[in-house]
Image (cartoon, helix red, strand yellow):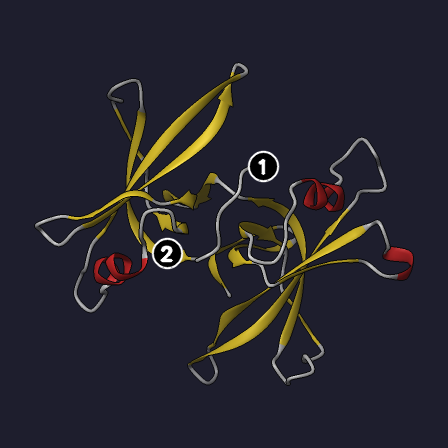
Amino acid sequence: MGKIMYTTKNEKGDINYVAAAVSFVSDGLGDAKDRVVNIGTSVDVYDPENKTRQKKYLNVGFWNNDDTSKAQLADRVHKAKVSPGSFLLLRTGTFRDAEPAGDGTPRMNASGFDFQYNSQVEIPVEGKAPVNIICGTARRTQLRDDGTFVANVPIDSKVDGNKVTTWYSISFKDKGKNNLGTRASKTIRDGVPVCILAGKITDNDGTNGMVYHNAYAFDFFAGFAKNQET
């Protein structure tokens, strides 16, 4: 399973951010052999006409560029050892309807632009504060006395060649009919891979040499697979 976390647009079409528990990984066939690797998952898609959500299979193709000086995404999928059960954040192009699967489930295809195991991505929003997607493994989860659920997600990066771990402390709150905090407290546990859609990130002074940032969650998707590092 997976979840469409956020969709934005550019001059070429949609850009989709999808949290994915990978169901299959397959190489291309025929002329596409050694040129494309397909990553599969399934997502619920909202049908505005019927006002319902429908499960669809999603196949994302990651291609090697003909220009060897540019991104070789198929090779990168193999190098990162993506396999069924991997938990990823996928960045894709516009979804395109395809022939239904053998079991009758609707199916979509999309071109893959990027994938990451552990990441923090800031997405600009015109006229508003940016949104952020934090994808990693939950640590130090706690339910506070005021009902706020907090999950801390460490993300590693390199600064001047040195490894730096930034901790994102994400707060989940119930608000009106939105029981986000309650749902998160029942789903997210230490060691569970999770992708979180959050608002503006606030810098926080680190303690004990640790760098912390804070944010409030809007939505999330939690998996069950063991996360990996690239």
Q: Which residue is mark 1?
A: 230
Residue 70 visible: yes
Q: Earlier in the sequence, mark 2 or mark 1?
A: 2
The dot on residue 220 is: 2
Foreground of the two, 154 or 226? 226
Amino acid, disc 2: Phe
Foreground of the two, 124 or 121? 121
| Res 201 → quadrant | top left
Q: Residues within 10 Å of mark 1 (few under 14, many from 20)?
A: few
Amino acid, disc 1: Thr
Say whether residue 74 is left or right of residue 41: right
SS for dot 1: loop
- Residue 143 vertical position relative to residue 202 in the rendered view, above or below: below
Separation of disc 2 and disc 1 at Cα? 22 Å
- Residue 89 vertical position relative to residue 183 in the rendered view, above or below: above
- Residue 137 vertical position relative to residue 164 in the rendered view, above or below: below
Q: Are marks 2 and 1 in contact (CB under 8 Å)?
A: no
Say whether residue 149 is left or right of residue 103: left
Q: Position of residue 197 (x, y in %)?
A: 38, 51
Q: Position of residue 126 (x, y in %)?
A: 43, 46
| Res 213 → quadrant | top left
Residue 134 visible: no
- Residue 221 vertical position relative to residue 157 in the rendered view, above or below: below
